[in-house]
Image: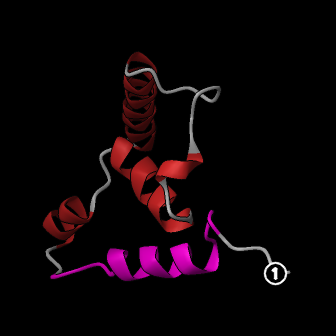
Amino acid sequence: MKQRGSRKLEYELDKAISELKESGLNLDNYDQQEHEGLGDLVESVLSKFGITEERIKLLTGLQGCGCEKRKQWLNKVFSFNKKKKP
């Protein structure tokens, strides 16, 4: 049973990667500037694999998962637009 789940996950990941490639996304043209920081990047990657705050709420039945709060924290701590100290 566990192996069947692994195959399904592998299939879903391969499908997501193929869709990303078909949309023109690759490592050569990926631009970090569309993300404020690590939180935005993590959210973007997870959503490409179908992992969204809405889906987590639906699957777990929770009111919220704290995704937005974690995203903001990661963006502040690991900002891609940090100003260099003089």
Question: Which quadrant: the N terminus?
Answer: top left
Q: Quadrant of residue 68?
A: bottom left
Does residue 16 sit above or below 54 in this rendering?
above
Q: Nearer the viewer, residue 65 or 4?
A: 65
Residue at (86, 81) in percent of width and height:
86
Residue type at numbered disc 1: Lys
Does residue 27 sit above or below 53 in this rendering?
above
The stretch drawn in magenta includes residue 72 = yes
**Percent position of residue 27, x then y:** 63, 30
Residue situated furthest right in the rendering: 86
Q: Secondary structure at mark 1?
A: loop
Q: Nearer the viewer, residue 65 or 9?
A: 65
Residue 9 shown left or right of residue 55 in the figure? right
Residue 26 shown left or right of residue 69 in the figure? right
Q: Nearer the viewer, residue 2 or 44?
A: 44
**Percent position of residue 85, x then y:** 81, 81
**Percent position of residue 29, x then y:** 58, 28
Bounds of the magenta span? Answer: 63-81
Residue at (56, 64) in percent of width and height:
38
Residue at (50, 82) in percent of width and height:
73
**Percent position of residue 67, x then y:** 35, 74
Residue 50 shown left or right of residue 62 in the figure? right
- The residue indicated by pointer 1 is 85
The stretch drawn in magenta includes residue 26 = no
Does residue 4 sit above or below 70 in this rendering?
above
